[in-house]
Image (cartoon, rainbow, N blue to C red):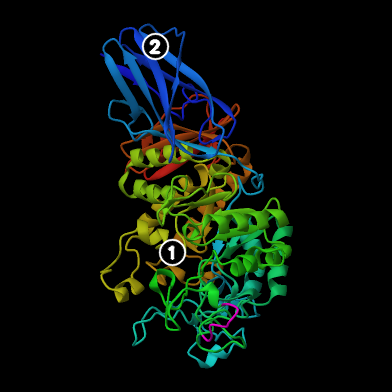
Amino acid sequence: MLKTVYFNPLDTKYKSVRGAVRANESFELVIRFSRPVNPDRVELVLIKEGESEVAYPLVQRETNDAGIFEFGTSLTVTSAGLYFYNFVIQGDEGTYHVGSDGNLDALLGKGNKWQLTVTDPIYAPPSWLSGGIMYQIMPDRFYNGLAVPVKKQASRPVKPVSKRLATKDGVIYRDDWDGIPEYRPTAGGKILNNDFFGGNLKGIIKKLPYLMTLGVTCIYLNPVFEARSNHKYDTGNFLRVDSDFGTEEDLSKLIKSAGKKGMRIILDGVFSHAGDDSIYFNKYGRYDSEGAYQSKDSPYYEWFDFEKFPDEYKAWWGIDTLPQINKNNKHYAEFITGAEGVLAKWQGLGIGGWRLDVADELPDGFTDAVVRRVKTVTPDALVLGEVWEDASNKISYGSRRRYFGGRQYDSVSNYPFKADILNFVRTGDGARLANTVANIINNYPKTVLDNLMNILGTHDTARVLTVLGEPSGSTESRQDRAKSKVKDLNKAVTKVKLAAALQYTLPGVPCVYYGDEAGLQGYEDPFNRKCYPWETVDFKWDKKQKNLLSWYRTLGKIRKSNADILSAGDYELVEADNGIFAFEREQGDERITVIANTRDRAYEYAIAGGPLDLVTKKPYTGVVPACGCVILRKL
């Protein structure tokens, strides 16, 4: 009877190319096993989704290991797509099916098929992002650059930036920079998102030197186009910068100023829906246009799907302030992706690329056209999709997506890493994190992997400090969560530092959500969207927050000085057990070892050769501190 079987696609002894392979690229697959006696035939069974299985015979190869059989084949797949495979061994004792145990290792008889992603890229990936650091900013909550002294922002009224008529329609300009964003619904049950704190593009320009101290190389801005709300995901006009944030000239100056400091700006492309208060829908008649809501003769009427004109229409997730756009409408597609369209206009201003909101709601044809236009105007621009799951095998609205076929995304947001980094720090479950990392590496193209947006928090999730801390009181109601604070700040900060170390050293590019590095707290929207605490950071210097900010700056320096490895180095798991997660990043003969310890006691781990701990800048002592980590590189 077959006793042991060996195969793992991340081990180049068994699959010569890690991760996705290119169409028409030759690669080797090898399986090893001990007994059955006299195997008659060993096959690789490969199936492309939607097609029939194809069996490829494997050829026996010589091995120096007594009692071990080795069979392999050279394989070339000619078309992009999603494939799955397993092995079949036929011998005089029977037929054995070999599949994956879920951790990518081989399992006899009951395993699943391994995934094989085949890509056929037509665009070169952007080379400027990998090895860098991203930073996400909600402009209204970052900094007011209109001659309002930072030290007075918490007490001095913030003057409105815009002349918008909305100031007499319930829009609130806040004068309490450190206040809690409005979360209470109206009598009709709606959350208006209509309170503004005064952050703007000029404020970001003034804070570029601060971002340099973090090592930031790419700034991702939440939407900046004209819109009614403070978050701007309800676009009112795709062709205008919102006056609350400034002008097109301000955006241009930000792009140029950031460029001089080695940073690129990417914008949030919200193309699945618009605002009901927009030039295109114009539900309230505030725009001097004939919107879709007003007339079936509107040039925008066919952009939207009315079930009963005008008050019943398809809306994003049923939110009636966000009428859903039909992306297959040729007029709309041309408006966004045409030679004179929205993408071309802002690419012409010099942006570094786009983060596409709710990517799974954009049809493949529309996404193809978006990427084609962006790459035509700026060949090295970044196009990054918001995807919350494994993007290589994502199914949305009944269809398998082809994000990595070679004509769509350079990369995606990395929610799988986020979930399991935070889980590891909370519970010590390194095995789950190791499994997630392994599967993402196996399923993604290498260029996508190196450019992953590695997050710990975003505008859509609770603050990382809140997630990793214990609340001081009840969090049952929204009112409770609005005022909730972490009970043991020291303990929570220690956990955030450990999570950030993994975020910065695993494959991909860390993306810091503004204020996480300064210890901002908050549960769900809008509590996770408080203003950056400049008064605390710049003047009071709370010790705990200073300690956290210093840590992020240290990690930024480590990434910059070790970009030769961290930008594209291979990943090798070392240990994932009993509260320890250790791995190596390798590039040629160079190697960085990361050991994360969630235990409440120090962990002894010997490494020969006297490596330098990049965190302390001292020789490694062989001890990983409690709830801490070491990042080691040989001298």
SS at mark 1 in the image: loop
Q: How many marks?
A: 2
Quarter location, residue 162: bottom right
Q: For this rendering, which residue is in front, 225 or 203?
A: 225
Is residue 327 visible from the viewing direction of this image? Answer: yes
SS at mark 2 in the image: strand
Q: Which residue is mark 2?
A: 69
Q: For this rendering, which residue is in front, 31 or 450?
A: 31
Q: Could you tell me which residue is drawn at 53 percent across and 54 percent down?
A: 364
User: Which is in the foreground here, disc 2 or disc 1?
Assistant: 2
Is residue 216 visible from the viewing direction of this image? Answer: no
Q: Main secondary structure of the magenta part?
A: loop
Specify which label sits upstream in the sequence, 2 or 1: 2
Q: Which residue is mark 1?
A: 460
Task: Estimate how packed mark 2 is, as few (under 14), some (14 to 19) or many (20 or more) residues with alpha carbons within 10 Å.
Answer: many
Q: Amino acid at mark 2?
A: Phe
The x, y position of residue 410, in whole percent, is: 59, 49
Give left or right: position of 271 versus 54: right
